[in-house]
Amino acid sequence: MFDLTGKVALVTGGSRGIGRAAALALGKQGAQVVVNYVSNEASAREVAEQIQAAGGKAEIVQFDVGNSEAAEKAVAEVAKRLGRLDILVCSAGISIDGLLLRLKDEDLDRILSVNVKGSLACARAATKVMMRARTGRIIFLSSVVGEMGNAGQTAYAASKAALLGVTKSMARELSSRSITVNAITPGFIDTDMTGALTEEQKASINSAIPLGRTGKPEEIAAAVVYLASDEAGYVTGQALRVNGGMYM
């Protein structure tokens, strides 16, 4: 079950956090994984080496998702070099928190460039390849914040909510070519983004989660593997909530 042998998967933001866990999980299921990174080559290489050490195939590719033109070009080059692209996981994302009244235009532009425009650019490049193959899986990493909102994260929530609209629209556009498009909306997950929280903040968050804890990147990665698999061939246009019951 969930065998991805022979598939090629590209994971943006694959050097850390949820992207890292997703890359490792896809590699474990047999996919050849391309790990994207922006600046931390060492971390990306470590992920690829872990996959290779377990008998899998992996390589790294550098590009900034925030530069949509470069991102689209890089995705196209990966597909051309490897001869196919079956799975795209858009995991790269940033958050610049603060009340809307204090939000700077340059911060808003950066959030939208990475979280929305970059994801769209990667998806557009991947779509061209997948349409010719008449198969494919596109998975966007949205957020529980995009569904329920959060004070101090208006811009981030807007970017993640946008991906939900993108998911539904692309799913309708591509269904005739057997390409599925889905999103995952993680709750609060143990990553670099949440690592900066104080213990008091973490306790407050956990009290609002029915399961009483933050999630693990591996729990999101398991959802990625499912949506990337043949077993999820009849699932498209959906937002899979992996949030401990924080938002139902």
Image (cartoon, rainbow, N blue to C red):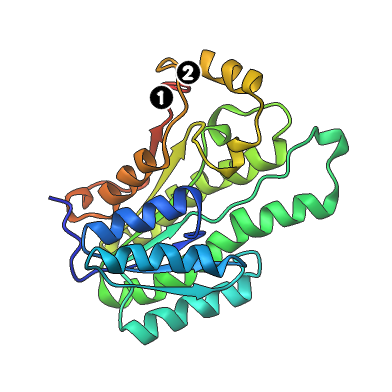
222 up-or-down from 69: above or below: above
Q: Amino acid at mark 1?
A: Gly
**Residue at image x 53%, y 41%?**
191
State the mark number for residue 244.
Answer: 1
Q: Image check: 188 left or right of 87?
A: right
**Residue at image x 54%, y 32%?**
147
208 up-or-down from 61: above or below: above
Number of residues whose C-alpha sits closer than 10 Å to that of mark 2, classed few (under 14), some (14–19) or many (20 or more):
some
Disc with the residue nearer the chain's start (2 vs 1):
2
Disc 2 and disc 1 in contact, CB within 8 angstroms: yes
Q: Position of residue 238 (x, y in %)?
A: 37, 42
Q: Position of residue 227 (x, y in %)?
A: 29, 49
Q: Nearer the viewer, residue 245 or 232?
A: 245
State the mark number for residue 103.
Answer: none
Q: Amino acid at mark 2?
A: Ile
**Residue at image x 39%, y 33%?**
242
Mark 2–mark 1 Cα distance, whole angstroms, equals: 6 Å
Q: Nearer the viewer, residue 108 or 162?
A: 108
Answer yes or no: is residue 169 visible: no
Q: Position of residue 116 (x, y in %)?
A: 60, 55
Residue 151: quadrant of the picture: top right
Of the 4 image quadrants, the one containing the C terminus is: top left
State the mark number for residue 209.
Answer: 2
